[in-house]
Amino acid sequence: MRAAVGDAFEVMVDANQAFTVAEARRRAHAYESFGLAWFEEPLPAEDLGGHVELAAAASMPIAVGESLYHPAHFREYLQRGACSVVQVDCARIGGITPWLKVAHLAETFNAPVCPHFLMELHVSLSAAVPNGTWVEYIPQLDAVTTSRMALRDGFAIPPDAPGLGIGWDFTAIDRLAVARATVQ
């Protein structure tokens, strides 16, 4: 991958919480020569101690957050040096206000934010904080939305229309629905 995109292109590796501490350390060492922007979710989210150990041993930043559900969890990770990139998810953290709290908390630790999922919503939030550095692009909702995150010259552009930035395609949602609950 590095050879294909060159050194100017940032490459990240997402383990999706798949490794033990020993395996994550082994892989972090093997990845050193690739100049990764970060190693994402190498361990289960609940393994704070493992993340502390890995972050101390790894040469690249460790990114966590898509499976953390309270601002206090992010505080613990940041205070203990268990991560250096915060991937807070608005839908999982409890909405826009807690998302902003986590982003500002990360700012106090000089940690960048790269939110997880719902890029149409997160592009505006990332633009609203000084440490909103990246926006993750996950096209899983493309089949049920009419909106797309705008990109210009390699940068994500927040929408200028009011709202959350997500245009649901209700016809597609109805077509894909397996069953509907009914209230009697």
Image (tube, rainbow, N blue to C red):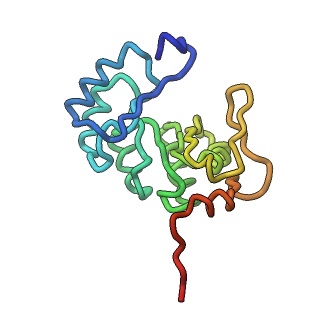
Q: Position of residue 2 (x, y in %)?
A: 47, 14
How many numbered circles does the render carry?
0
Q: Position of residue 24 (x, y in %)?
A: 27, 30
**Outermost residue, right side:** 161
Residue at x-position 40% and y-position 34%: 14
* Left or right: 15 as drawn, with respect to 125: left
Res 158 quadrant in image: top right
Residue at x-position 24% and y-position 40%: 50
| 111 versus 36 height, above or below | below
Q: Position of residue 82 (x, y in %)?
A: 34, 39
| 112 versus 122 height, above or below | above
Q: Position of residue 162 (x, y in %)?
A: 77, 57
Residue at x-position 65% and y-position 47%: 120
Q: Judge by depth and name the residue closer to the eye, 124 or 97.
A: 124
* Left or right: 182 as drawn, with respect to 129: left
* Left or right: 59 as drawn, with respect to 153: left
**Outermost residue, bottom side:** 184
Q: Judge by depth and name the residue closer to the eye, 172 or 40.
A: 172
| 13 versus 48 height, above or below | above
